[in-house]
Image: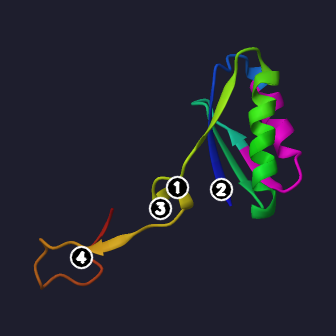
Amino acid sequence: MRMVFFVSGLTCQECAEKLEAHIQRQPGVNAAALLVTGKLIIECEEDYAEAIEADVMASAPKAQGDVRAKRVQRSSAEDLGMYIWRIHPNLKDETTSSDRQVRI
């Protein structure tokens, strides 16, 4: 399962690395990456998701002063690593079925 958080207020690189390392050590976490944009992406086992989310919320302020973490809800299939395809209505019949597929 993938969880995505937005971490704001983190200005120290060493603090960011410590937060990322802390999350990576948690039970059920398969991988974690804290990007420079503030996006924290965690791949984890679904059974541990609630505990990991609570840990992120509690750990972020401890990393550096006024740091906040907010879980970003999955709003599109792309967040899940999947693609949704549909037939585009404006393409002509002579195109192949693969040409009529467009990513939405």
User: Label 4 amino acid?
Assistant: Arg
**Residue beneath label 3, please?**
77
Is the C-beta separation of discs 1 and 3 under 8 Å?
yes
Mark-to-mark CA distance, 3 and 4: 20 Å
Left or right: residue 47 versus residue 103 is right
Q: Which residues are magenta?
A: 16-32
In percent of width and height, residue 76 lies at: 45, 57
Q: Residue at x 78, y 62 (%)?
A: 45
Choose the circle earlier in sequence order: 3 or 4: 3
* C-alpha span from label 2 to label 3: 12 Å
Disc 3 crowd rating (10 Å Cα; few below 14, some 14-19, many 20+) is few
- In this figure, which residue is indicated by the disc labeled 1? 79
Q: Measure how far apart labels 1 and 3 are at the Cα level.
A: 5 Å
Residue in view at x 79 percent, y 47 percent: 52
Is 81 positioned to the left or the right of 17 in the image?
A: left
Give the percent coordinates (x, y) of residue 26. Answer: 88, 47
